[in-house]
Amino acid sequence: EKGTYPHFMLKEIDEQPFVMRNIISKYKDDFDKIKLDEDIRRAVMGADRIYIVAAGTSYHAGLVGKQMIENIAEIPVETHIASEFLYNMPLVSENPLFIFLSQSGETADSRGVLVNVKEKGFKTLTVTNVPGSTLSREADFTLHTFAGPEIAVASTKAYTAQMAVLAILAVDTANARGKEMSFNPLQELAIVANAMEVLTDQKEKLEQVARDFLSVTRNAFFIGRAADYYVCLEGALKLKEISYIQAEGFAGGELKHGTIALIEEGTPVIGLATQEHVNLSIRGNMKETVARGASPCMISMEGLDDEGDAVVLPKVHTHLAPLVSVIPMQLIAYYAALHRECDVDKPRNLAKSVTVE
Ligand code: F6R
């Protein structure tokens, strides 16, 4: 039920702080340590390489997950689009673990890969919002994302929940490998929940950003580097699917290798800067687009912010910045779709779970 909300999507965006707190409580033991199934821990520990397989928004969460697991647990990870992996399988390592990320647990493309790799005898783990779903039943192990039912076609809370669970898995693995960890995901996710709340309380401002930048345009670009690039892919997908604005997420440095040709007077370019090591270079890329007439909308994180940034995110741990920076993107997409009188919860041509290849 959407209660007083006009749309499920807005309700689900607002639920994200609660989802974070729920995940913390489900993955915490009585000693405030991470609680995780011993068999899953062993499966991850035994892997020489992890393959994350997913589609759409879940694929974007998988890109962030790759970075988290590599940086925190120091296990190599590849993230693949399920439908591509199916017909263009890379060389796989000797002891791989396959992680299927899926909100619904029913995505046919991901299931195709699962069936394939199971035949080869590889270990499989499904991270899903629906335990008991096909992907959950057919994999060796399941981790639950505890986001609650997601009704709007455009995925929001399932995405942040997937990344939260992958962060916990990454740290648990690092702990099991005996690595000194200063990063406590259970504590840091509580800070993320508060930061999400600050942003979901800024609806009027974000509606204004959507009106100023996106109410008449035909296209829009999202640029970022490193983890911010992955969030830009997601921001662009959200905008595309519900507002029908042609939007693309780009790695900041890649723009000048072709796409910058599309920038004209007034083209909206949304820039994201939450990662200190790329802050100056992404700002440089923004300037290049402005010099060609772009309308810039900069989203940055406290501590890295500059005068004139449209949105400043409360500070959270670098590893978890994507969970917070996606919130204004979800809200901006939502309000852009409203201004354009689109059917937010049921965009044209889309289904909530894609059970055909
Ligand atoms: C986008 C969206 C889709 C899904 C994709 C995978 O908002 O919802 O891109 O993320 O179809 O679905 P799941 O996660 O159910 O496998």
Image (spheres, grey):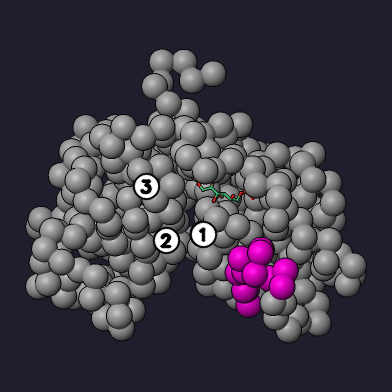
| Percent position of residue 222, x then y | 31, 61
Q: Amino acid at mark 2?
A: Leu
Residue 80 tag number: none
Q: Amino acid at mark 3?
A: Tyr
Mark 2 surroundings within 10 Å by alpha-carbon count, few (fewer than 14), some (14 through 19), many (20 or more): many
Q: Amino acid at mark 1?
A: His
Q: Nearer the viewer, mark 3 or mark 2?
A: 3
| Percent position of residue 33, x then y | 64, 49
Does 4 appear above or below 151? above
Q: Could you say which is closer to the camera, residue 242 or residue 146?
A: 242
Query: Magenta residues?
Result: 76-87
| Percent position of residue 333, x then y | 34, 44
Q: Is mark 2 within 8 Å of ligand 1?
A: no
Q: Residue at x 55, y 55 (%)?
A: 56
Mark 3 surroundings within 10 Å by alpha-carbon count, few (fewer than 14), some (14 through 19), many (20 or more): some
| Percent position of residue 307, x then y | 9, 57
Residue picked out by circle 1 = 60
Check if residue 335 falls in the magenta segment: no
Q: Could you say which is closer to the camera, residue 288 or residue 86?
A: 86
Residue picked out by circle 2 = 233
Q: Contact (CB < 8 A) between labels 1 and 2?
A: yes
Q: Nearer the viewer, mark 1 or mark 3?
A: 3
Residue picked out by circle 3 = 244
